[in-house]
Image: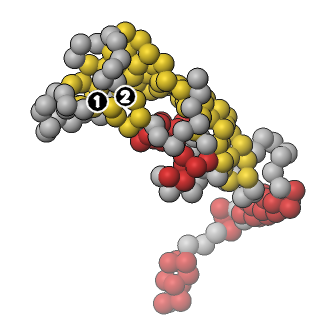
């Protein structure tokens, strides 16, 4: 069942060996908790498939849905679909100085762990670098502004091309001519 929860903990101590599914709705309050300002709203469904073994747990994270950010082009709000699948391994170990990106180590005395940070990072990684509206859906005033900018740029390029290489005199030669 989907948890509309403020805790993103998996209590693994009582789990039988084998597969277990956990699901959460990642709502705007989730991202505010991490003081994220990029994601304005979210409608995400996160699922964690946990395989518990004797000495480790394998966790597969699947995050799907949409997030609202600001459009890079016009600055208006835009919804973007995102999808992520990531995997981590949690090993039981009393060694504390071990570190690895794909493996987390849990002390054998622990009975639960908070996966909120992983859900947050994996969601953020799935948000595209470029966030823009589909063609023609940007704010009309902004569209007009960008169209004019593009026209100005094209005009400038044309003018620069018209100035032929032969017409160009290196300013250093000009300076030398004056010395005569």
Residue 43: where, in percent of width, then height?
66, 38
> In this view of the protein, which residue sits in the foreground, 139 or 117?
117
Spot the residue most to the bottom. 179
Number of numbered callouts drawn: 2
Q: Is residue 101 above or below residue 130?
A: above
> In this view of the protein, which residue sits in the foreground, 157 or 105?
105
Residue 93: quadrant of the picture: top left
Q: Is residue 21 above or below residue 127?
A: above
Instruction: Determine which of the numbered discs, if any, sits on residue 11 in the image.
Output: 2
Q: Looking at the figure, which quarter contains the N terminus?
A: top right
Q: Are marks 2 and 1 in contact (CB under 8 Å)?
A: yes
Residue at 38 percent across and 37 percent down: it is: 114
Residue 108: quadrant of the picture: top left
Residue 92: quadrant of the picture: top left
Spot the residue most to the front. 14
State left or right for residue 170 relative to residue 162: left
Residue 165, can we see it? yes
User: Considering the numbered disc 1 on the image, is that residue within a helix, a strand or a loop?
Assistant: loop
> In this view of the protein, which residue sits in the foreground, 6 or 72?
6
Residue 48: where, in percent of width, then height?
47, 24
Instruction: Identify the residue under disc 1.
Output: 111
Q: Is residue 19 above or below residue 29?
A: above
Q: Residues within 10 Å of mark 1 (few under 14, many from 20)?
A: few
Q: Which of marks 1 and 2 precedes in the sequence?
A: 2
Residue 20: where, in percent of width, then height?
44, 16
């Amino acid at each position: 069942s989907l948890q509309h929860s403020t805790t993103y903990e998996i209590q693994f101590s009582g789990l039988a060996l084998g597969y277990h599914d956990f699901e959460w709705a990642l709502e705007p309050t989730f991202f505010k908790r991490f003081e994220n300002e990029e994601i304005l709203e979210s409608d995400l469904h996160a699922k964690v498939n946990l395989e518990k073994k004797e000495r480790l747990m394998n966790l597969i994270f699947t995050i799907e849905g949409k997030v609202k950010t600001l459009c890079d082009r016009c600055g208006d709000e835009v919804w973007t679909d995102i999808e992520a699948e990531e995997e981590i391994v949690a090993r039981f170990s009393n060694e504390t100085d071990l570190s690895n990106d794909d493996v987390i180590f849990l002390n054998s005395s622990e009975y639960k762990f908070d996966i909120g940070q992983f859900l947050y990072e994996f969601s953020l990684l799935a948000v595209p670098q470029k966030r823009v509206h589909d063609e023609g859906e940007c704010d009309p005033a902004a569209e007009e502004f960008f169209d004019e900018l593009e026209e100005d740029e094209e005009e400038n390029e044309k003018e620069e091309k018209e100035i032929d290489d032969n017409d160009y005199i290196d300013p250093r030669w000009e300076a030398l001519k004056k010395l005569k």
